[in-house]
Image: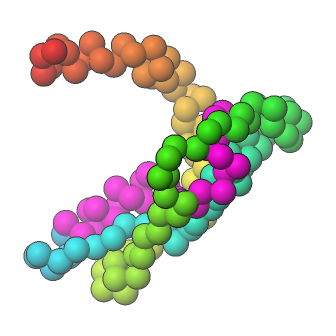
Amino acid sequence: MPVYGRGENVRDWLYVEDHARAIDVIFHNGKDGDTYNIGGFNEWKNIDLVKVLIRTADRVLGRPEGADDDLITFVTDRKGHDMRYAIDSTKLRDELGWEPSLQFEEGIGKTVRWYLDNQEWLDNVTSGDYLKYYEQMYGA
């Protein structure tokens, strides 16, 4: 798992279904012309996220915790790479009542299990086969 720099970059993380639910809430209840930021109120350093992913996958696969920590590889960071992306979803929460439904690690667990349960889909994405679909649908 390549990690930029020392993994100190910070990002705000959100479970995908919570993101989709936020879009639905904004579509149905938001004010026309207003802007709503969607975030998880959940900032993590990249290295900490990677360690949670590995720990979760190890647990789901029945491996000892940390068995796959050696998969982490630190790579040179991109020039000008932002150290922190922050999203303030306070307006969305206060005006429309939306907030994430899952605790972060619960969402990570569901995400890891989905990928493990959908190996054929993952194989198609990592092999590049999905590009054939786009070529068929939209041309080269």
Identify the residue shown where x is 40% and y is 75%.
89
Residue 10 at x, y percent in the picture: 58, 61
Q: Position of residue 101 (x, y in %)?
A: 50, 66
66 vs 76, left or right, is right
Q: Say if the magenta span includes residue 2.
A: yes
**Quarter of image, res 95:** bottom left
Q: Is 120 a magenta residue?
A: no
Q: Is residue 16 above or below residue 96?
A: above
**In the picture, which quadrant includes the N terminus?**
top right
Vertical placement of residue 83 versus 30, above or below: above
Taking the image as drawn, is residue 134 in sight?
yes
Q: Residue at x 27, y 13 (%)?
A: 132
Q: Is residue 116 left or right of residue 68?
A: left
Instruction: Give the extent of the magenta segment.
Output: 1-27
**The furthest residue to the bottom:** 94
| Residue 4 horizontal/vertical position (percent) | 61, 43
Image quarter for residue 3?
A: top right
Viewer-proximal residue among 66 and 73: 73
Q: Is residue 33 above or below residue 82?
A: below
User: What residue appears at the point 24 percent right and 69 percent down from the top-left corner?
Assistant: 26
Give the residue displayed 30% in from the left and 18% down from the top. 131
